[in-house]
Amino acid sequence: MSVTSRRGFLGAVAASGTTLTATQLAAASDKLDLASLKKDTDIACIYHCDFGDPKRFGQLLTNMNNHLSVYEFDTLRVKLVLVAHGAGVKFFLDDLTGTPWANETVDPDLYKRFTGLTKFGIEGYLCEITFKRNKIDLAKAKKDSFLKFVPSGVATLAELQAKGYGYIKVG
């Protein structure tokens, strides 16, 4: 029996046409199941975003920043998660064409603000049911590593609360 190198194996797989595309790999790794959700800081809160109002979303981001500032942006002391479903997912899409919000525009600075907060451990959980019911391709979601798909936004809210997360809804 010959020893097969990792490079040789990957080359053979590539040659056979059975490689996974980068999109397939990303889609497989950016999904969370409810059982994998954990609370690993004393202070942990969920921010609930089921609305599409940009001013309200901006206020949510301000509140998250203020929340983090009280804990000196220390990721060992506080964990914040944003759960988006319904119209709230539009802030996390690359492109609104083919969605219920196709005639709207989203200020890109809102997502830049969210991205800035992710340096302090914030993650965004996007509801797969919202994508399915609105016939939105999951690939339309932004590809950043701090965004994860969850099976259901509302079920994720309940799961995190059961695990000790506080619940906050702006507006």
Image (spheres, rainbow, N blue to C red):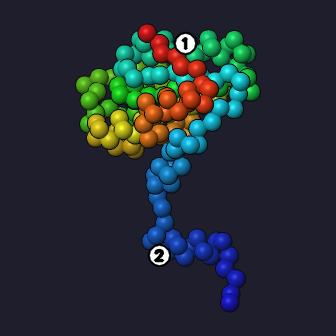
SS label for mark 2: helix
Residue 64 vertical placement versus 11 (above, below): above
Quadrant for residue 107, please give it: top left
User: Residue 94 or 53: which is nearer the viewer?
Assistant: 53
Q: Please give left or right for residue 161 compared with residue 105 in the image.
A: right
Quadrant for residue 97, please give it: top left
Residue 110 x %, y %: 47, 20
Q: Residues within 10 Å of mark 2 (few under 14, many from 20)?
A: few
* Residue 113, visible in the rendered structure: no
Residue 28 vertical placement versus 143 (above, below): below
SS label for mark 1: helix
Closer to the N terminus: mark 1 or mark 2? 2
Q: How many marks?
A: 2
Residue 100 x %, y %: 26, 29
Picture disc at residue 62: 1
Residue that sits furthest to the front in the current view? 162
Q: Residues within 10 Å of mark 1 (few under 14, many from 20)?
A: some
Quadrant for residue 42, please give it: top right
Q: Residue at x 44, y 71 (%)?
A: 17
Image quadrant where one finds the C terminus: top left
Q: Residue at x 55, y 26 (%)?
A: 161
User: Residue 132 or 6: which is nearer the viewer?
Assistant: 132
**Pointer 2: what residue?**
16
Residue 105 x %, y %: 33, 23
Which numbered disc, 1 or 2, marks the residue closer to the eye? 1
Q: Amino acid at mark 1?
A: Thr
Q: Residue at x 57, y 73 (%)?
A: 11
Q: What is the C-alpha distance between the residues marked 1 and 2? A: 51 Å
Q: Amino acid at mark 2?
A: Ser
Residue 134 x %, y %: 28, 36
* Residue 45, visible in the rendered structure: yes
Residue 71 vertical placement versus 4 (above, below): above
